[in-house]
Amino acid sequence: MTEHALEVEGLRKTFGDHVAVDGVSFSLPPGGSLAIVGESGSGKTTTARMLVGLERPDAGRIRVGGRDRSHVARGRATRLARAREIQMVFQDPYLSLDPRVTVAACVEEPLRLHFSMSPAERRARRDELLARVGLGEREADALPRRLSGGQRQRVAIARALATRPKVLILDEATAALDVSIQAQILDLLAEIRRDTGVGYLFVTHNLALVRHVADDILVLYQGRVVETGPTREVLAAPEHPYTRLLLHSVPRPGWDPARIAADRRALAAALKETPPSPASADPLRHVPETNSTERSAAQ
Amino acid sequence: MTGRLLEIEKLTVRLAAGKAARPILGGVSLHVERGEAVGLVGESGSGKSVTCRSVLGLLPEGASASGSLRVNGEDILTMSSTRLRELRRRDVSMIFQDPRASINPMRRIGDFVTEGMRAGGVPQKDALKRAEELLESVGIREPGPALHRYPHEFSGGMLQRVMIAGALAGGPRLLLADEPTTALDVTTQAEVVSILTRLRAERDMGMLFVTHDLELAAAICDRIYVMYAGRIVEAQSAEGLFGRPRHPYTSGLLAATPRLESDEPPHGVPGRPVSLAEAPDGCAFAARCAHVRPGCTEREPVHREIDGAQVACLRAEELIHD
Ligand SMILES: Nc1ncnc2c1ncn2[C@@H]1O[C@H](COP(=O)(O)OP(=O)(O)OP(=O)(O)O)[C@@H](O)[C@H]1O
Ligand SMILES: Nc1ncnc2c1ncn2[C@@H]1O[C@H](COP(=O)(O)OP(=O)(O)O)[C@@H](O)[C@H]1O
Ligand code: SF4
Ligand SMILES: [Mg+2]
Ligand SMILES: [Mg+2]
């Protein structure tokens, strides 16, 4: 049995008396690609933030490469080792880069922090990373404000790859880009995954995108997993009413927004009475309980 | 007071003379009939928002405009400011791209929604009653108490509905919707669109729907204009545009859009979108076009009609994109 790149069990987070993430479990095989989908406020970003240590879970386990990271890291070495393993790229390419730091320095920063390299080695690795994402010398010397949104996301990806992570989390990382540029970035990400074996966690509400980038899909609704499985199967035959609603919401010929609006309200009303329960015997496709390890291993 | 609801002819907008002087719209022509939903699509910086704002007479500071821009036959560009204000209050409304940036955070929702009505002389009490109905119709629960709340107490999706309610308060005949759903998730987007579609049918309102999402435009609109670098490069029925795109940029956009129903992965268009000021002589798309010929960089392609489509590409007749 191969080790998972990422394994999450019973993750939970509350803000005051609001439960943002509730009993979320899943696993990502090395080099796999999993999409976390759900409407605004469903807990996608909160889940991602717990994985990279920006938020502390109230309960649950997170294992990366088989190592547990549920407890607060003791010491700088452990903290750095954890940071190396999972990296994240955010949605807004205009906020995520320091406006005073050149592209070259921005990519060198994690190299300096995580590895002891000679300046020459560091420059070589930096250039390799920039070339990897299709940026050249001209861009390397530039400040972020001189770059387009797509170029900024390339910088963010290069920087995230600097530590050779096992998992890269992309939180709506292409949502702010023009479609012609989004497609370029998706091509690049596919190529990087093929070449380096990094695993992806796509956070998005765009199911059409998921169809083309993710092997597996996990649907969150009000902080809970309501359906999960191979992308192809889930999109072809969604079992949970919320997954069906998400699917119908994607604009296309014959799209019926009035019906979607009505379905959405009906679903919210129905689930107010009986909230989705992650561990119940709901007729969901693979209910991601504690046996997630076996299930993924069997795929 | 006759003529088309909206008719824009050869609209060119240039920024003020001096250092920043540059053109941002280059001869845009488009029209919207009563009760019609028309899409305006294109990537960021192509000039969609500038086009919409010009219809309200809102040009960038010091900018000059040529061409014509008529609403019900009246030219916006030569209109008195009094008449323009009246037009904005009664006939033409706009839903702006970013609700948080365009609703005053210090004022209550009720003030925002009733603003135009009060300016038009509607008594406060009647205006508030009407505002409550409007909030209800856009799906805000407890509309009465909502009138007394402030913008920060609403999520992005809810605030966008408040803006729609405000835009509809004057009973406009023309609605300019500038990416009204770009900041929303897909289910909320569907809800907002259902509200707009219903109101359009109920009031025979014309709508110019701006988006960079071709699938969304096709699902809502009768006709679609595609904009690139400050110019319209193609105009067609929504069906025609998908079935038989005529301009290489349109087919590039279609190929780049991830599809739920297709195994074909999205393909990028090489290069990046340019603004009109950056655009070289000849066809602005030439640097990214797979079909470019030497002649393309010499003359600017003019619009021609081919099988019911308006296309500005020198090779439109020979190229078939499937
Ligand atoms: N720091 C915080 N304090 C209080 N509540 C929070 C905080 N962060 C998130 N929440 C709440 O937790 C829930 C989940 O938020 P989260 O940001 O994870 O949603 P999301 O699925 O990423 O949504 P979106 O698609 O809008 O990005 C929401 O109800 C949100 O309001
Ligand atoms: N107020 C303004 N002052 C100067 N330039 C502007 C202003 N508004 C828009 N522009 C420029 O006009 C072009 C078109 O912008 P815009 O209409 O906002 O594009 P879109 O809405 O299609 O993304 C861009 O190059 C933009 O920088
Ligand atoms: S005019 Fe030439 S460069 Fe421009 S779109 Fe047509 S073929 Fe391409
Ligand atoms: Mg989020
Ligand atoms: Mg705009």
Image (cartoon, rainbow, N blue to C red):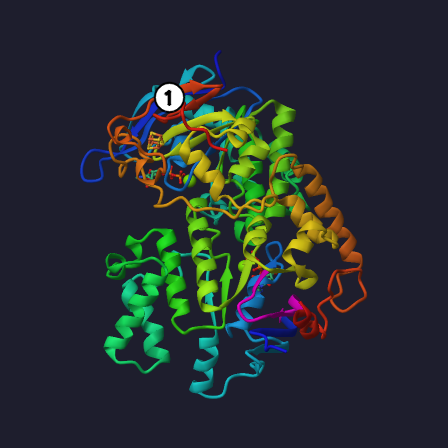
Identify the subunit bearing mark 1. Answer: B
Dot 1 surroundings within 10 Å: few (below 14), some, or many (20 or more)?
A: some
Asked whether the viewer can see residue B161, the reply is yes
Picture coordinates of residue B54, whole percent (x, y): 38, 29
Above/below status of B49 relative to A35 = above
Residue A192 quadrant:
bottom left
A145 w.r.t. A117: above or below: above
Horizontal side, residue A57 vs residue A134: left or right:
right
- Amino acid type of disc 1? His
Answer left or right for A14 relative to A237.
left
Assess whether residue A23 is covered by the magenta stretch.
yes
- Residue in the picture at 73% in, 64% down: A286
Quadrant of the rendered image holding ligand 2? top left
Front-most of residues A178 and B89: A178
Residue B163 located within the stretch drawn in magenta: no
Along the line of sight, the residue nearer the viewer: B290 or B210: B290
Q: Is residue A66 left or right of residue B21?
A: right
Q: Is B131 drawn above or below residue A71 in the view shown?
A: above
Q: Position of residue A34 (x, y in %)?
A: 58, 62
| Magenta stretch bounds | A14-35
Mark 1, secondary structure of its residue? loop
Pointer 1: what residue? B303
User: Which residue is at the far top?
Assistant: B2
Residue B98: x and y, percent? Answer: 47, 45
Does the magenta stretch mainly form a helix, a strand or a loop? Answer: strand
Q: Nearer the viewer, residue A5 or B201?
A: A5
View extreme (bottom): residue: A75
